Amino acid sequence: MKTLPLVLAPDPLLKKISQKVDKVDDNLREFLQQMVQTMYHEGGVGLAGVQVGLLKRVLVMDIDYEILDHHRHHHHDNEEQNYEEFEIKNANPQYFINPEIIESSPEKSSFKEGCLSFPGARAEVIRPESVTVKFLDIDGQERVQRYDGISATCIQHEIDHLNGITFIDRISPLKKEVILKKLKKHKNG
């Protein structure tokens, strides 16, 4: 399955607000599956639509998988044809369409977060320890589910993306500046 190119900071797209999904159809389902593939390929635990250039309120998450094997297939005639084959153990991808946090715990937890749109950057972020989320699943069925621990952190991080917020917007200005400087260097060199 095809993997999608990532949108990397400081791309202004990451500051845009994603639009609600009107209908869950096969095109969207296929795109969500490509998002999962991309997330595995990049070694992430969550991915929001905007991070692969789609300004729609969708995200995917899988926090327990392991990658066993990596084979890359390059077709030189066409960049698009960069297919990945790998074996994944414990895959349990979750799909969220129009996710909304309807309740957050007063207890907070702190977690060192990273982000596929900020290669190599990590920072301690404090968020509610558990959240209840209302969303549509990949079949378009409405669900309400509670998440805690790393799942809660991950889903809040991804929902932030849908609102044009990245994890560095939640840390001190000084730390944010350090990360952005490093990314600039990374981009230019």
Image: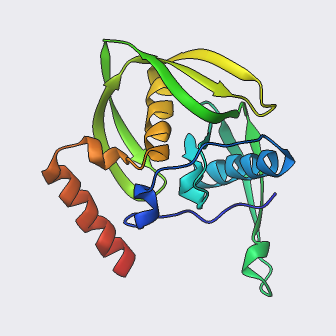
* Outermost residue to the left: 174
Residue 34 vs residue 176: left or right? Answer: right
Residue 159, above or below 129: below
Colouring scheme applied when the structure was drawn: rainbow
Residue name at image x 65 percent, y 48 percent: 40
Residue 64, above or below 79: above
Residue 150, above or below 83: above
Q: Nearer the viewer, residue 78 or 141?
A: 141
Residue 72, above or below 145: below
Residue name at image x 71 percent, y 42 percent: 22
Confirm whether residue 181 shows in the render.
yes
Q: Quadrant of residue 77?
A: bottom right
Residue name at image x 19 percent, y 59 percent: 177
Q: Position of residue 170 (x, y in %)?
A: 27, 41
Residue name at image x 18 percent, y 51 percent: 175
Q: Position of residue 83 (x, y in %)?
A: 78, 65
* Outermost residue to the bottom: 77
Q: Quadrant of the N terminus?
A: bottom right
Q: Nearer the viewer, residue 20 or 135?
A: 20
Q: Quadrant of residue 135?
A: top right
